Image (tube, grey):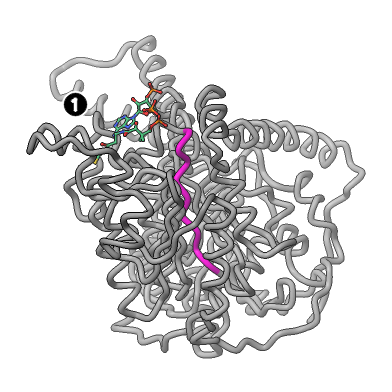
Amino acid sequence: MFRIESKADTSSPEFLRNKEEYLKVLNAYRQTLEKIKQGGPEQAVKRHKERGKLLARERIDLLVDRNTPFLELSALAAYDLYNNEFPSAGIITGIGVIHGKETMIVANDATVKGGTYVKESIKKHVRAQEIAMENRLPCVYLVDSGGVFLPEQAQVFPDKYDFGRFFFNQARLSAKGIPQIAVVMGLCTAGGAYVPAMSDETIIVRKQGTIFIGGPPLVKAATGEEVSAEDLGGAEMHTSISGVADHLAVNDVHAIQICRNIFESIGRQEFQELQMQEVKEPFYPPDELYGILPLDLKKPVDSREIIARIVDGSLFHEFKERYAPTIVTGFAHIMGFPVGILANNGVLFGETALKGAHFVELCTSRNIPLLFMQNITGFIVGRQYERAGIARDGAKFVHAVANANVPKFTVIFGGSFGAGNYAMAGRAYEPRFLWMYPSSKISVMGGEQAANVLITVKEDQLRAQGKMLSADERQKMLDTILQKYEHEGSAYYSTSRLWDDGIIDPADTRKVLAMAIAISQNKKYNKTEYGVFRM
Ligand code: COA
């Protein structure tokens, strides 16, 4: 492979200015993350500790193997929603290593409204199980939850991917031989009682964990029976009388130790071989990305400059370099793992789509994971292009991406707009993981284009009635739409709603992608079958 020759002048004023501006954006993100990681209100954290309980993130730290990374997902879920009263949506999810085994961990944060679930918490829990299914990862549920956040019940209870989906998924995961382990460290009530009950193996902490379908107040109201929580669904009872739980722990630390012991008997069931290479650091340092990444999305960025700072040795075997230059395609390694990269380098034309589809076919036929680096305004528009069949060529690319059965990974490094999002493995195309940078943007089209479309439609309507927009009205409409798109297009807005798996620091891209590819090796890659390509 040849080394990419960077053309970036890292001492130029332009580079340094971009870096300074980028670091401001990144630091704002880091501060937000830091605050979110503190969990619920100070008072709730204090009370939680006084009860002798560990915090959710402390529990995870103890559960995973020492000195191994935890790939946390969607840490900013529910950000800027519910008056910011649900940091991380009250649930921490991510992949950690337990006795050498990559495991999906789902931990309720009881300091956040008693660990109750709002819409985003549900989405996060279900997404974690989906990732576990796609990658054959065992699941550990660290349960400490008051169940549904009752004022939001209509948003969390009845639909297909709502609360009930947790237990459906547990049954399906278990049926596939994917271990389901619950550690009950707090309340586990009503529907929530099924998390431990549906698990393959369950641990419960004495005088702390409870499991019941209806708590003491409900029992009293329903039957008049007066019973303590411990007697109704405590650890002693469940491990000796009901058999709902299997192991009695004396405290959090003991429970986590038992959970780790369970993993000693869990082996890896499948493994996808990949053609590995020796790990090399990129020739161009990853933190140079801060000087290169686009903050103004109108400014074109050669995506080879980004690739050079992500891949091993900055080595890249480019495919069809001279053809359809608005997409860069080629092979590289990331921390030793092979990967086929598609990176936008401008708007998508018909030939760009054909090149993309061809490259996806190469990767699926060679069993090489695909990395999509998005910075896309969409497909080219206009009479000439419609006549040449841009929709036909675009469809081939979308078809190839949708059916590609090697793992897909998507990183949005600039903008992600319109159908370009689909062709480049947006969320609907089931990439195994999708990450944003703090500076990234995502919406159906850019704010200015949307404003122009809407103003044109409005003007056409008014013209038909013999009226027209005044300059003031026009400006007001423009400002309102621009503002709305700016707000809704931000990475924070996206990650809050689980349109992605989280925001990452660009300099961590290599590390994060390497973990993701390693995770994907837990399940053999399925054979790809394509349908009818429109010719
Ligand atoms: N729905 C909405 N809010 C809830 C809630 C629920 N199910 N359970 C707890 N909360 C809220 C509380 O109102 C409180 O809010 P605030 O901080 O704004 O006052 C916050 O969560 C913490 O609750 P609190 O009772 O003070 O904390 P705790 O740690 O002592 O107890 C629980 C937490 C979850 C054990 C306890 O609140 C409880 O038993 N909740 C009811 C659980 C239940 O019956 N759920 C059935 C739903 S299917």
User: Which contiguous range is marked in magenta?
Assistant: 103-111
Looking at the image, the residue that sits furthest to the right is: 11
- Residue sitting nearer the eye, 316 or 512: 512
- Which residue has dot 1 on it? 461
Ligand 1 in which quarter: top left
In the image, taking residue 180 as reference, residue 227 lies left or right, namely left
Amino acid carrying label 1: it is: Gln
Ligand 1 within 8 angstroms of badge 1 C-beta: no
Residue 226: give x, y in percent of width and height. Answer: 18, 35
Tell me the crowding category of disc 1: few under 14, some 14 to 19, or many 20 or more residues within 10 angstroms, Cα based.
few
Dot 1: element? helix
Residue 249: give x, y in percent of width and height. Answer: 49, 57
Position of 24 relative to 324 (above/below): above
State the residue at coordinates (33%, 70%): 392
State the residue at coordinates (65%, 35%): 34
Q: Is residue 493 visible?
A: yes
Question: Dividing the image into 4 quarters, which one contains the N terminus?
Answer: bottom right
Q: What is the magenta segment's predominant secondary structure?
A: strand
Q: Is residue 430 visible?
A: no
Residue 383: give x, y in percent of width and height. Answer: 36, 56
- Residue sitting nearer the eye, 231 or 332: 231
Residue 62: give x, y in percent of width and height. Answer: 63, 55
State the residue at coordinates (67%, 36%): 30
State the residue at coordinates (53%, 50%): 251
- Residue sitting nearer the eye, 504 or 178: 178
Position of 462 relative to 494 (above/below): above
In the image, taking residue 381 as reference, residue 376 lies left or right, namely right
Q: Inspect the magenta stretch and tell me whether residue 496 lies in it.
A: no
Question: Dividing the image into 4 quarters, which one contains the C terminus?
Answer: bottom left
